[in-house]
Image (spheres, rainbow, N blue to C red):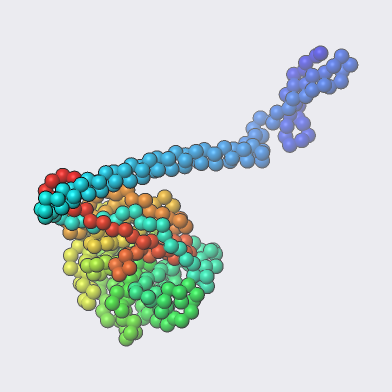
Amino acid sequence: LQFHHTLFQSPEEGWQVYTSTQGPDGKCLCTAVIPVQGTCSRDLRSRQLRQLMEKVQNISQSMEVLDLRTYRDLQYVRNTESLMKGLDSKLKVAAETQKSVNAKSFQVACVCPSRPVAFANKHRLLLANQGNEWGLQRSIRSCLQRVWYMDGYYKGRRVLEFRTLNDFITGQNFVQHLLPHPWAGTGHVVFNGSLYYNKYQSNIVVKYHFRSRSVLVQRSLNAAGYNNTFPYSWGGFSDIDFMVDENGLWAVYTTNQNAGNIVVSRMDPSTLEILRSWDTGYPKRSAGESFIICGTLYVTNSHLAGAKIYFAYYTNTSSYEYTDIPFHNQYSHISMLDYNPRERVLYTWNNGHQVIYNVTLFHVIKTSGEL
């Protein structure tokens, strides 16, 4: 056998002959071909292989992150279990000795929100899946049996009031309100028959009364950023976010003086005057969304999949802590998140779906002894 090392162009797909083997009679028995130098980067199959390898690497990295998060969640559950066992033991000792437990402080903490109940407004769902990702977001507020629906995150003026949650789902039995001023963001809230919202392209707070169909009061939220100056991480003109908890009306926003950190203010619902403010020290652009329960502000670290309740600020003690509470973000894009103190649930608008989270609360009792 004779071996010949050659280099010449093959007519097919830019391949070249690298080596060839011939028999005694001169007939070719075997030919090895390789791509022309520099061709691999442009070859379709090579590009597909490279893309596949990148996907495999991404999946591998995601699995590593998931494994780490699972381990951290498991440790959190174990630590909580140990805490509860210690508390149970202390309570049993107190009951047996008939001594009262003198609590120095009571702190409301949010345990892992339960699996959400999701529903979609069938009449509107197709709109949420088309084109503009942000322009078709909505906000939903519920009080008792009524639901208020506001379409879009800026320049809207129409509010639909549904009698029940089922009416909202079916798109029936509603009353339309036309606001005198357009809104900005999705941080609106309905409280005691009035809508509190941020007036478009301003830091003005508007209180609109549904029954009289009139603005009762409007006031500038001094130095508050607006028009996407200090929004949540998803944008959407979410500079000013109104909330209601067991203590009343709150506003969450940011000012230049606070260097972009979240400010939470307790407001008088009648006059819209600020009663007191707290600088949390947490950058608002790094927050996915936030909600308040019993004067404690909880902040998620993202609006996307994998988000967690990452930060808590306690207004009663002007203190904060970093938390690690899993938050099941099923549809991967939250653009509204609020707590309803009457029903003790979280309402979210999540990528065209309206999702309700049942919230479990417990009291951490700090006594003179250590738990």
Question: Is 120 drawn above or below residue 65 in the view shown?
Answer: below
Q: Which image quadrant: the N terminus?
A: top right
In the image, is 218 to the left or to the right of 355? Answer: left
Residue at 38% of width from left, 57% of height from top? 114
In the image, is 25 to the left or to the right of 32? Answer: right
Residue at 33% of width from left, 84% of height from top? 211
Q: Pick whichever, 167 or 217, lies toward us.
A: 167
Residue at 50% of width from left, 38% of height from top? 60
The image position of residue 274, as x and y in percent, is: 20, 69
Q: Pick whichever, 115 or 298, lies toward us.
A: 115
> In which image quadrant can residue 347 be found?
bottom left
In the image, is 258 to the left or to the right of 353? Answer: left
Residue at 72% of width from left, 34% of height from top? 14
In the image, is 33 to the left or to the right of 153? Answer: right
Q: Residue furthest bottom?
A: 212
> In which image quadrant can residue 235 be found?
bottom left
Q: Which image quadrant: the C terminus?
A: top left
